[in-house]
Amino acid sequence: QVQLVESGGGLVQTGGSLRLSCAASGRTNGREAMGWYRQTPGKERKFVAAINYNGGGIMYADSVKGRFTISRDNAKNTVSLQMNSLKPDDTAVYFCNGGSAYRWPNDYWGQGTQVTVSS
């Protein structure tokens, strides 16, 4: 089993920035594809961004392209999501998602971290 733990959420004003991190532990081999999803109350979880184990395969949802950047540090088994120019519509619980294959959604989920963007 792979455990994913997110950090970095919080409250920010419109136009501000936040950086989310996700640390993987447990039965990880360092070759997991990793991604981010987000969810608002009463809505389904939506894809935000993904990155393959080798740093390739980067994808973004149209709604965040040009504002969010996903990256990873394989030495630390972490994946990050730099979020700039935040909007109130970005308010959600953000979940880290990962697994051994490059597919979305993937096998393992973190517990989520709240991001709130005030207008």
Image: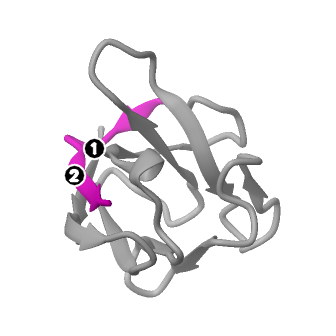
Asked whether, in this view, residue 112 is left or right of residue 109, the answer is left
> Does residue 25 show up?
no
* Distance (Cα) linking label 1 and label 2: 9 Å
> Does residue 53 show up?
yes
Circle 1/circle 2 CB separation < 8 Å: yes
Q: Nearer the viewer, residue 47 or 51?
A: 47
Q: Name the kind of residue labelled 2 in the image.
A: Thr
- Image position, residue 98 (x, y; %): 49, 45
Asked whether, in this view, residue 98 is left or right of residue 109, the answer is right
Q: Residue at left 47%, top 30%?
A: 107
Judge whether residue 117 is colored magenta: yes
- Indicate whether 102 appears above or below 42: below
Question: Would you call the spot at circle 1 few (<14 residues within 10 Å), some (14-19), or many (20 or more)?
Answer: many
**Residue where numbered disc 1 is placed:** 110
Q: Residue at left 59%, top 37%?
A: 47
- Image position, residue 75 (x, y; %): 45, 87
Q: Name the kind of residue labelled 1 in the image.
A: Gly
Q: Residue at left 33%, top 50%?
A: 27
Judge whether residue 1 is colored magenta: no
Q: Residue 105: name its quadrant.
A: top right
Count the marks: 2
Q: Provide the secondary structure element on which disc 1 rests.
A: loop
**Residue where numbered disc 2 is placed:** 113
Question: Would you call the spot at circle 2 few (<14 residues within 10 Å), some (14-19), or many (20 or more)?
Answer: many
- Image position, residue 67 (x, y; %): 64, 72
**Which region shows up in magenta?**
107-119
Q: Nearer the viewer, residue 49 or 104?
A: 49
